[in-house]
Image: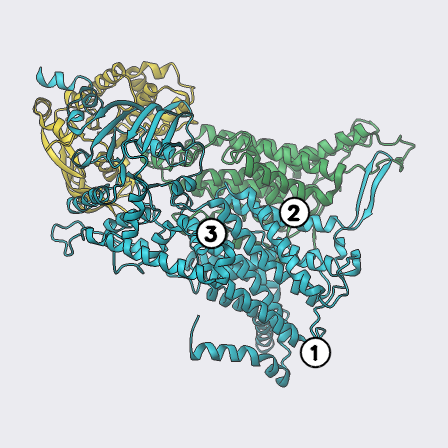
């Protein structure tokens, strides 16, 4: 948010506006207040769509629940006990938010494992079911033969809706037809919501949301729990519409199911998309523009077109009514934004990825890791767990088996990683190496066998829980969070070692503030260690390839692992970068006593750095030993070069 | 016939080929061998246009390929049996073969080519109505090669035909590859199984981390120790 | 509305006809289900074909169906048809209007793809979906402006003859009319034609191949973009045919009908297994039956909720549908 002059001018304008309007007689405050309610809704949707990346097409359902919660609790229609008290509005607004949040969880839960476009359809489905339910639950009659246990039960007011609804009470402030008190009420709620959302975005939870949005699997394997993170997005996003819906209901004094149809969800989506999903300023801007367009511009354009018609003498123009075109323009707007400027008006513009060049005379040499820059806290953390388990292997895999359809990907595989060792895992194409990584990190379930880490079985833990236990991994095709900065990527790595909750993120007690400061400090130290200092605010996708790989390692180190799984870390690197990376791996083991399990195709690297090597071929372990042993092992030669290669050679 | 000169290919930011040069003369079987991740399939994809060379040239009979779209390249007379076979799983053997001939202008000759494929691969003739996904690995490999032949190519690209097959089947397939070559088709064979590949090929290139590190007559490569050392990272 | 049971206990029929029994209600609703299902099947095929080839939920497809109905009205007017068709007109004008409407909606669908979806081919899965929603709204609004907000009357161009009573002399509360024959008579040849196209012709096979493995299809020399265009063309044509059938059967059209019909047809496509064409056809029939029975035995007010509940259940618990194949996501 802008500081200084611009900020104060804006606040002043907002405070003064309704009085200016009254003096000048424009009478726009009602419309503007209604528009502000929709902007508040859009901000709630922004949490789901913009922060967490979940395309919710049925957001109006939460709006409905918020409005109906307030309506039903605070109206004489159903004989609610809350109606008629001075504090009833102020109480019910919180109940409405809570009910909306619960509904958010209920709607979010089925979508957890579902792909993005299907998720959108599911939310759309709920968005349709809720108004149908509201319409039809105003007159419920259940007949079982001749027995009628329920007759004409009215739960929601049905098609007629609910009215009247109790107004807020504040001594000295009349909440009736004068729009000014409503304006300030909404303004205060809006400002408080913005404050809370801002805090959420720059918090442990906000980073978790963005990580999920960018790459859910990578987030999971970095220690972020996708289930709770997504549900929180739904719940919190929905709760804001609980507030908005409550005020809407109380202001309008009457609510009907017709106000919460699909079009409303899409209009809110338009606001978010146009302004820029994920940007608070953008959503407010988008919301204002759309409200202005809808309420003002269309009417004005109609007058203009009619005037032109009258002047030029074209009768069709004279009868034109451009307000009938609103959905056409909204649809056109959505399509144009997606086609021309998908990041919206205020979103971060995505620059094209810079091309790396492998010319022999490339200017800047790769920065080697700074051994002296190893953070002491990391060193302590790693060394700390050494004691009791000294001689036991850190990872023990026994009889691991996994099939895909008819293909046996892993066949009764044994593998041991001694503590503090670097173990290489090699094998021809399709040997099952990445599958093994996926099983160890919990992404895939094994069908047989047992994995023991530091003496305890990993059982059926989720990936993020396995990270918390102390196993980190990198991916074959680097999976960073591309639109987050370098430092943010590392901070996501620290997610599982931090403790700030939702409440803590918003209220920011001293403990949370110092935890965040410590986390940032540690992140910077890690970046210095891997040789990325000074780049902490660069956007991850703009980094050259070698730096991206190092960032991935820094992120993995941030989870404070005792075992790190590297999947083809030198893939696509030039010889110089390969050397640097190899040195880094060696440093990790030497200085931090980190155990490493390494998949590699670059044979020179793997033979050079590994203490021991396991070879897989078609899912079966065919050899295990030191590099020298493996290089001479007949079955290994056969697997890579073909049966009888050696015999052929000497023939 | 085919010429790659100093080709550099990238996947996004990752450089997969670092200055690859190779050539294939008409009538030859040339093999490109190397460990996995070395860049073998990337080379074939660059030839076919699925991946683009950022530097360097690819020419076929004098024509530049690196500026053409894939379906145009295929029409010039190049066909592929892809890595992993990539049979259309829910289409029959016959339909797969017919699709191989999709780009051919001379539709009348397709029937006789179909017969030719069935003669080469009698197992396929027995299973014309069976859907591709239900075939065994060996049958799928035969179908992939047969499908490529249906385009009546002058240059046939084979990507790891031995993958996942028993040694006996591998021998059969490679014998058929030699037959195809004798019948006039030039072949570029990409393989991980160095022995079989060097036995059938005339010349060979060894690729490692995106660079050609060895090239010679196939017989000479088969005799030398260098191939094994390269594969298994001995200095 | 033709086909509805007019009496349900208590009213009695004309000519001293007996009260309707439950069996007749069931038969009637099954016939209703069949006619609805045929329309849903035609629309669902368009969804499933497009999704199969580019993994896009073409949100605007239902509105192409709606516009098919509106456009066919214009074609009838252009050809000077004002009253019920008779005799030879049924075999000349009727197929002509079908063909013209189908061509128009096919071209419309292709235009939508080229303008709105093609630029986003390499983008995320969500961007074209949002664009499709935008297009959907645009199409609905165009229809609204074209013919006004009220439902429009579709002229009674197809003769409606009560078969049981007038041809067979059977007195029953069940209504089977020549319009039901129209639905069957129009849908079956279309399905047969589509099946032939997809299994016997070169381009039909190219379509299937591209949907199964785009890169390999390209390596066979198949022009992928042209194949995608063809898919939109065929899908659009089917939706147009469905629109003509709908108009001639129910004699009414609403500018908002595309949304509901589209979502029900999409449910059908998902139920059958998205990408699976026989599945889409069967799914369409199922949803047709379901909606007819739900309207009759529960209440038309709840049918939407029931269909959407099924959609949600399928997407959550069995996203590959009843006949589809499971495709694992690779890590």
How far apart are labels 3 and 1 at the CA level? 44 Å
Residue C134's spot in the image, x, y percent? 52, 55
Report the chain holding disc 3. Answer: A
Report the chain holding disc 1. Answer: A
Colour pattern of the rendering:
by chain
Q: Nearer the viewer, residue C18 or A239?
A: A239
Q: Is residue A338 above or below residue B165?
A: below
Asked if residue C75 shows in the view, the reply is no
* Labels 3 and 1 share a subunit: yes
The residue singled out by tag 3 in the image is: A53
User: Which of the two labelled residues, at mark 3 and mark 1, occupies the earlier sequence position?
Assistant: 3
Asked if residue C81 shows in the view, the reply is yes
As drawn, the chain in cyan is A
Q: Nearer the viewer, residue A169 or A519?
A: A519
Residue A360's spot in the image, x, y percent? 12, 50
How far apart are labels 2 and 3 at the CA level? 23 Å
Q: In the structure shown, which secondary structural element does the residue marked by tag 1 occupy?
A: loop
Q: In the structure shown, which secondary structural element does the residue marked by tag 3 occupy?
A: loop
Quadrant that contains the C terminus of chain A? top left
Report if the CB atoms under discs 1 and 2 are less than 8 Å apart: no
Q: Nearer the viewer, residue A405 or A532?
A: A532
Residue A599 falls left or right of residue A61: left
* Residue drawn 71% across the image and 66% down it: A87
User: Color used for chain B?
Assistant: yellow
Q: How crowded is the residue under tag 2: few (<14 C-alpha within 10 Å), some, or many (20+)?
A: many
Image quarter of residue C35? top right
Residue A219 falls left or right of residue A14: left
The tag on residue A129 is 2
* Residue drawn 11% across the image and 53% down it: A361
Residue A358 falls left or right of residue A230: left
Q: How crowded is the residue under tag 3: few (<14 C-alpha within 10 Å), some, or many (20+)?
A: many
């Amino acid at each position: 948010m802008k500081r200084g002059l611009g900020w104060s001018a804006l606040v002043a304008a907002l405070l003064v506006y309704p009085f200016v309007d009254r003096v000048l007689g424009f009478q726009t405050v009602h419309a503007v207040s209604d528009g502000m309610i929709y902007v508040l809704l859009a901000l709630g949707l922004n949490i789901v769509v913009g922060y967490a990346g979940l395309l919710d097409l049925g957001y109006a359902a939460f709006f409905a629940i918020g409005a109906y919660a307030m309506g039903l609790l605070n109206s004489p229609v159903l004989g609610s006990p809350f109606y008629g008290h001075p504090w009833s509005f102020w109480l019910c607004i919180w109940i409405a938010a809570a009910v909306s949040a619960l509904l958010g969880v209920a709607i979010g839960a089925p979508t957890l494992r579902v792909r993005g476009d299907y998720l959108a359809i599911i939310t759309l489905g709920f968005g349709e079911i809720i108004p149908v339910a509201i319409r039809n639950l105003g007159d419920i009659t259940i007949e079982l033969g001749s027995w009628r246990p329920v007759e004409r039960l009215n739960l929601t007011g049905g098609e007629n809706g609910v009215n009247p609804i109790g107004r807020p009470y504040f001594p000295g402030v009349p909440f009736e037809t004068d729009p000014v008190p409503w304006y300030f009420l909404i303004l205060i709620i809006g400002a408080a919501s913005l404050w809370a959302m801002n805090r959420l975005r720059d918090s442990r939870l906000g980073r978790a949301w963005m990580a999920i949005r960018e790459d859910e699997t990578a987030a999971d394997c970095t220690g972020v729990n996708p289930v709770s993170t997504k549900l929180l997005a739904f719940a919190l996003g929905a709760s804001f519409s609980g507030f908005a819906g409550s005020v809407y209901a109380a202001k309008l004094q009457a609510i009907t199911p017709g106000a919460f149809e699909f079009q409303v969800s899409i209009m809110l989506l338009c606001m978010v998309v146009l302004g820029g999903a994920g940007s608070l300023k953008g959503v407010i801007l988008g919301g204002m523009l759309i409200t202005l367009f809808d309420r003002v511009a269309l009417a004005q354009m109609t007058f203009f077109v009619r005037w032109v018609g009258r002047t030029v003498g074209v009768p069709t123009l004279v009868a034109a009514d451009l307000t009938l075109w609103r959905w056409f323009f909204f649809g056109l707007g959505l399509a144009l934004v997606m086609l021309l400027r998908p990041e919206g008006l205020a979103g971060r513009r995505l620059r094209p990825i810079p091309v790396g060049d492998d010319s022999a005379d490339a200017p800047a040499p790769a920065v080697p890791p700074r051994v002296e820059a190893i953070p002491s806290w990391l060193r302590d953390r790693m060394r700390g767990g050494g004691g009791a388990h000294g001689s036991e292997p850190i990872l023990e895999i026994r009889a691991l088996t996994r099939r895909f359809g008819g293909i046996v990907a892993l066949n009764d595989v044994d593998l041991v990683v001694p503590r503090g060792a670097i173990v290489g895992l090699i094998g021809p194409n399709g040997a099952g190496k990445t599958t093994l990584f996926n099983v160890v990190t919990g992404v895939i379930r094994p069908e047989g066998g047992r994995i023991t880490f530091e003496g305890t079985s990993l059982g059926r833990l989720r990936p993020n829980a396995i990270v918390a236990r102390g196993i980190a991994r990198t991916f074959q095709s680097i999976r960073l969070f591309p639109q987050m900065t370098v430092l943010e990527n590392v901070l996501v790595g620290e997610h599982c070692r931090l403790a700030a909750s939702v409440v803590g993120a918003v209220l920011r007690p001293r403990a949370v503030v110092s935890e965040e400061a410590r986390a940032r400090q540690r992140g910077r130290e890690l970046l210095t260690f891997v040789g990325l200092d000074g780049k902490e605010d660069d956007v991850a996708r703009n980094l050259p390839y070698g730096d991206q790989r190092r960032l991935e390692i820094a992120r993995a180190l941030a989870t404070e692992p005792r075992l790190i799984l590297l999947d083809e870390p030198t893939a696509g690197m030039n010889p110089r970068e390969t050397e640097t990376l190899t040195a880094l791996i060696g440093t990790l083991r030497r200085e931090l006593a980190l155990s490493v399990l390494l998949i590699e195709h670059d044979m020179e690297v793997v033979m050079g750095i590994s203490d021991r090597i396991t070879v897989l071929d078609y899912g079966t372990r065919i050899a295990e030993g030191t590099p020298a042993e493996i290089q001479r092992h007949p079955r290994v030669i056969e697997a890579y070069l073909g049966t009888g290669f050696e015999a052929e050679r000497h023939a | 016939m085919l010429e790659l000169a100093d080709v550099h290919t990238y996947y996004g930011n990752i450089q997969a080929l670092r200055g690859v040069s190779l050539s294939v003369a008409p009538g030859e079987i040339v093999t490109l061998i190397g460990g996995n991740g070395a860049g073998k399939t990337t080379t074939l994809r660059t030839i076919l246009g699925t991946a683009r060379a950022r530097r360097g040239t690819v020419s076929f009979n004098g024509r530049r390929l690196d500026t053409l779209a894939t379906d145009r390249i295929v029409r010039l007379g190049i066909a592929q049996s892809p890595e992993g076979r990539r049979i259309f799983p829910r289409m029959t053997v016959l339909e797969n073969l017919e699709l191989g001939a999709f780009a051919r202008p001379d539709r009348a000759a397709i029937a006789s080519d179909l017969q030719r494929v069935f003669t080469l691969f009698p197992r396929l003739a027995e299973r014309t109505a069976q859907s591709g996904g239900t075939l065994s690995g060996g049958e799928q490999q035969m179908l992939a090669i047969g499908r490529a032949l249906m385009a009546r190519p002058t240059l046939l690209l084979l990507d790891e035909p031995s993958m996942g097959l028993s040694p006996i089947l591998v021998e059969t397939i490679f014998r058929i590859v030699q037959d195809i070559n004798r019948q006039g088709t030039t072949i570029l064979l990409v393989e991980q199984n160095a022995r079989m590949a060097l036995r059938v090929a005339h010349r060979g290139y060894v690729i490692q981390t995106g660079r050609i590190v060895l090239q010679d007559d196939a017989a000479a490569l088969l005799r030398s120790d260098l191939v094994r050392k390269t594969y298994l990272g001995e200095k | 509305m033709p086909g509805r049971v007019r009496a349900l206990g208590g009213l009695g029929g004309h000519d001293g006809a007996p009260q309707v029994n439950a069996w007749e209600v069931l038969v009637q609703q099954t016939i209703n289900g069949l006619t609805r299902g045929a329309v849903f099947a035609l629309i669902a095929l368009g969804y499933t074909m497009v999704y199969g080839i580019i993994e896009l939920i073409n949100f605007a497809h239902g509105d192409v169906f709606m516009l098919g109905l509106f456009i066919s009205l214009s074609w009838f007017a252009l050809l000077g048809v004002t009253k019920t068709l008779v005799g030879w007109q049924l075999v000349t004008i009727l197929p002509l209007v079908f063909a013209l409407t189908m061509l128009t909606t096919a071209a419309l669908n292709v235009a939508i793809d080229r303008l709105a979806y093609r630029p986003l081919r390499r983008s995320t899965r969500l961007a074209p979906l949002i664009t499709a929603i935008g297009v959907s709204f645009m199409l609905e609004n165009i229809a609204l402006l074209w013919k006004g907000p009220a439902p429009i009357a579709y002229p009674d161009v197809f003769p409606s003859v009560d078969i049981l009573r007038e041809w067979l002399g059977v007195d029953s509360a069940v209504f089977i009319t020549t319009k039901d024959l129209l639905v069957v008579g129009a849908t079956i040849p279309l399905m047969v034609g589509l099946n032939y196209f997809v299994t016997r012709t070169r381009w039909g096979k190219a379509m299937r191949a591209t949907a199964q493995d785009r890169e390999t299809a390209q390596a066979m020399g198949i022009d992928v973009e042209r194949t995608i265009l063809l898919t939109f063309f065929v899908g659009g044509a089917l939706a147009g045919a469905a629109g003509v059938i709908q108009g001639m059967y129910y004699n009414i059209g609403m500018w908002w009908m595309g949304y509901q019909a589209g979502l029900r047809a999409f449910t059908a496509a998902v139920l059958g297994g998205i990408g699976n064409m026989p599945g889409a056809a069967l799914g369409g029939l199922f949803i047709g039956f379901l909606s007819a029975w739900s309207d009759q035995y529960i209440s038309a007010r709840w049918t939407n909720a029931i269909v959407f509940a099924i959609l949600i259940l399928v997407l959550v618990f069995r996203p590959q549908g009843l006949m589809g194949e499971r495709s694992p996501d690779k890590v």
